Amino acid sequence: MIAETICSAVSAAGLGIAVITAYRKRFLAATRIAAYALVPVALVMTGVVQWAAGTAFSPVAWAGFGVLAVAWVLLMTTRAVERRGGGTRKERRAAAKAARGAAVEPGASAPSLGAGARPVERPKAKPGTTSGSGDDFSDIEAILKKHGI
C-alpha cells in the first residue's frame, strides 16, 4: 500500500516538472521527463511493485539471489581459468591436432632445443639510418613481416 502511494507521488512530481519544462518551451525534454514520470505508475498498475515488495522480504527470494551470485562467480572463474589455460577446449583440440599433423608429415621431426635449433633472427637496421629517426619505419616493417602482415 505504501509503495503504491510513493510511486504515485513520484509520478505526480515528475509530471509537474514536465509541465514546468514545457512552459519554458523545452518540449522535447518535457516529453522525455513525462515518459520517465509515468514509469512508476505503470509498474504499480502491472503489479511489479507488489511483486518487488514481496520479493524484498522473502527469504527464499534472497536465497535465490545468493544461488545466482554463486553461479555467476563459478562462470567467471571458469572463464578466467580458460583464458589462462590457452583458450577454449575447441582451440586446444585444434592445436593438438595441428601438432600431431605436423609430426606425422614425412621428413618432419619434433622440435628440439638441442644443436639443431636455429637462433632467432633479429631484423637488422638499414645502412645509413639511425634508430632514433622519426621517419624510420624499418622496425615497424620488420614486426609486421614477422607476423605475416
Image: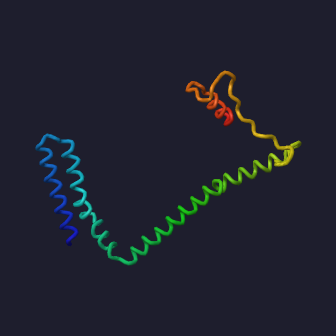
Query: At which x and y percent is residue 138?
Result: 64, 28
Q: Residue at position x 21%, y 67% from top?
A: 4
Residue placed furthest toward the top: 128
For the question of whether residue 149 can be seen, the reply is: no
Q: Percent x, y for residue 18?
A: 16, 49
Position of residue 72 relative to residue 61, above or below, is above
Q: Residue at x 46, y 68 (%)?
A: 69
Residue 9 falls in image quadrant: bottom left
At which x and y percent is residue 26?
17, 41
For residue 149, above or below residue 55: above
Q: Is residue 115 left or right of residue 69?
A: right
Up-down relation of residue 48 to residue 124 (above or below) = below
User: Where's the C terminus, which quadrant?
Assistant: top right
* Residue 22 visible in the displayed image: yes
Q: Which residue sits at x=55%, y=26%?
A: 134
Question: How are the residues colored?
Answer: rainbow
Q: Residue at x 20, y 72 (%)?
A: 1
Q: Is residue 110 above or below residue 4?
A: above
